[in-house]
Image: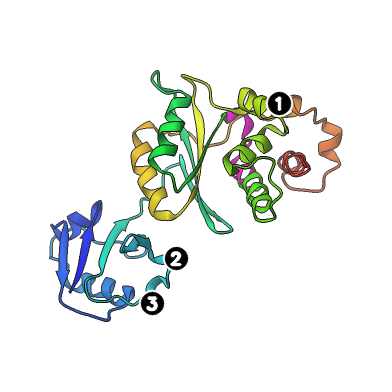
Amino acid sequence: MIQVKLLGGAKKSFSADTISIDKDSLTIAELIDYLQKTKPENTPDLDVNNLLVVVNGVDSSAIEGKITKLKNNDVVSIIPIIHGGSSRSTIQISKYFVEILEIKPNKTQSIDFLNYLRKKYPDLVIQGISPKYILSKSHAKKILEISVEAQNSHNMLSQKLEIDILMRFACTRQISKAISEAGIKSKQSFIVIALGKKFSLENLYSELKPYLSSKNISLNNTGFLKNQFKISNKQIDSVYSKKPLEDLLAEKAAVLF
C-alpha cells in the first residue's frame, strides 16, 4: 500500500487530501500515470510537468527522479509547483535550487523577519539584499555562482554562505559595512535570496506569497551602482560584453579574497 498526500491544487484535482493505492513496486512516473488515469471527471487537470514529488520527506530529485521505485508503506507527497509571476525566479546553482523574491515594504518587517525565516527553514540558506544592489536577475545569479564556488573551494569570505553572499553584493570584505550598505532596511522593500532543496523553497514561497511585490527584480539603479563602486563609462566601454556593468560588478565580487 502506498499513501499519496495531495497538497495545493492537487487536492482539487482529486477532491481529496490523501489517496491509498494498493500497488507495490511502482515508479514515480508510473504513479503519476496511474493518478492521471484515475482522476475524477469534471475536476481541474493535474499539470504533471510542474509537480514536486516528495517520498518519505525526501525530494525525489535527490533520489532517482521519475524512475524512483516506490515500496510498501511509502508516503508520497504531490505538490503542484506554481510558475509565472514577475516576482518569482527559480534557478539552479551547483547542488542548490535558488529562489529570488522581491518583498514589498511592510510596516512590521525588519531584520527580525529574516531571523524568523532562518529559524523556520534551517535547511535553507537565506539572505536579504537591498534592491539597490541588484542590477538584474542575471546579475544576482552571477554573484550567487561566485559565492557557491567559493564555498565549494573552501574560499569563502565568511564561515556562513549567507554572509559571503551579502559581502559580494556589497563588494566589501567588511561584514559590518556589507550589512549597513547592502542589507535590508526596516519598512523598505528588499530581495530575499534562498538556496536549498525545492521542497523547502516551495514552502517558503507559499509563506512569502502575500508579501511579494509585483515588480520585476530590475531597477533603474545603474547610476547608483556606477557611483557606489566607482565604475566609469570608460571602464564600461572597454568591456566586450552584452552586459558590461553586470560583468564588472561580478568581477569586483570575485576578487574579494
- Which mark is on residue 87? none
* SS for dot 2: helix
Residue 80, percent across and down?
Answer: 31, 56
Could you give the CA–CA distance between mark 1 and mark 2, rounded to whole angstroms? 42 Å
Amino acid identity at mark 3: Ile
* SS for dot 3: helix
The image quadrant where one finds the N terminus is bottom left
* SS for dot 1: helix
Residue 107, percent across and down?
Answer: 40, 18
Viewer-nearest residue: 116 or 206: 116
Query: Looking at the image, is mark 1 or mark 2 nearer the viewer?
Result: 2
Question: Does any portion of residue 83 appear in the rendered image?
Answer: no
Secondary structure mostly taken by the magenta-highlighted segment of the chain: helix
Read off the residue under disc 3: 67
Tell me what residue is drawn at x 57 percent, y 28 percent: 130
Q: Which residues are magenta?
A: 131-140
Marker count (numbered): 3
- Which mark is on residue 223? 1
Quarter-of-image position of residue 81: bottom left
Viewer-nearest residue: 20 or 139: 20
Confirm whether the magenta stretch covers residue 169.
no
Question: Which label's residue is closer to the chain start, 1 or 2?
Answer: 2
Marks 2 and 1: in contact by CB < 8 Å?
Answer: no
Question: Which label's residue is closer to the chain start, 1 or 3?
Answer: 3
Could you give the CA–CA distance between mark 1 and mark 3, rounded to whole angstroms? 50 Å
Read off the residue under disc 2: 62
